[in-house]
Image: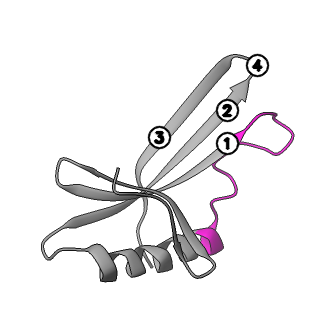
Amino acid sequence: MLARNFRAGPKEIDLVVLKAGVVAFVEVKTRATSTGGAPLEPIGRAKRRLVVAAARRWIHEHGRPGTTYRFDAIGVVVRGEEVSIQHIPDAWRPG
């Protein structure tokens, strides 16, 4: 893990991780009940723009030439002791 809760002003990236030479900016959403919908539903256009803006700041401060970057999403559902995780690599591209 390269960073956790990286902040760029009001913008935040939950996780910045490195695996196999790729830096992933990861948005994590967790739900304990189904009343709020699926955990990945709130990662809409506005949220993605905020994550991309924070990622640009992270790259400016810590990036290296030639590095590959991507944006991942992880949805976690917790029901009692049962935990379900959905990972979507390369979930979106900056627009």
The percent position of residue 80, horizontal first and vertical second, equals: 76, 19
Q: Do the residues labelled 2 and 4 touch (CB within 8 Å)?
A: no
Which labelled disc corresponds to residue 77?
2
Determine the main secondary structure of the stretch shown in magenta: loop
Label 4 amino acid? Answer: Gly
Tell me the SS state at disc 1.
strand
- Residues at marks 3 and 4, CA–CA distance in whole angstroms: 20 Å
- Residues at marks 1 and 3, CA–CA distance in whole angstroms: 12 Å
**Of the residues under marks 1 and 4, which one precedes in the sequence?**
1
The percent position of residue 33, horizontal first and vertical second, equals: 81, 34
| Residue at horizontal 62 percent and vertical 24 percent from the top | 83
- Residues at marks 1 and 2, CA–CA distance in whole angstroms: 6 Å
Label 2 amino acid? Answer: Val
Q: Magenta residues, as a range?
A: 31-47
Which labelled disc corresponds to residue 87?
3
The residue singled out by tag 4 in the image is 80
- The quarter holding residue 71 reads bottom left
Q: Do the residues labelled 3 and 2 touch (CB within 8 Å)?
A: no
Q: Is residue 40 magenta?
A: yes
The percent position of residue 40, horizontal first and vertical second, equals: 63, 49
Indicate which label's residue lies in the foreground, 1 or 3.
Answer: 1
Q: How crowded is mark 4: few (under 14 residues within 10 Å), some or many (20 or more)?
A: few
Considering the image in quadrants, where does the C terminus appear?
bottom left
- The quarter holding residue 69 reads bottom left
Indicate which label's residue lies in the foreground, 2 or 4.
Answer: 4
The residue singled out by tag 1 in the image is 30
Label 1 amino acid? Answer: Thr
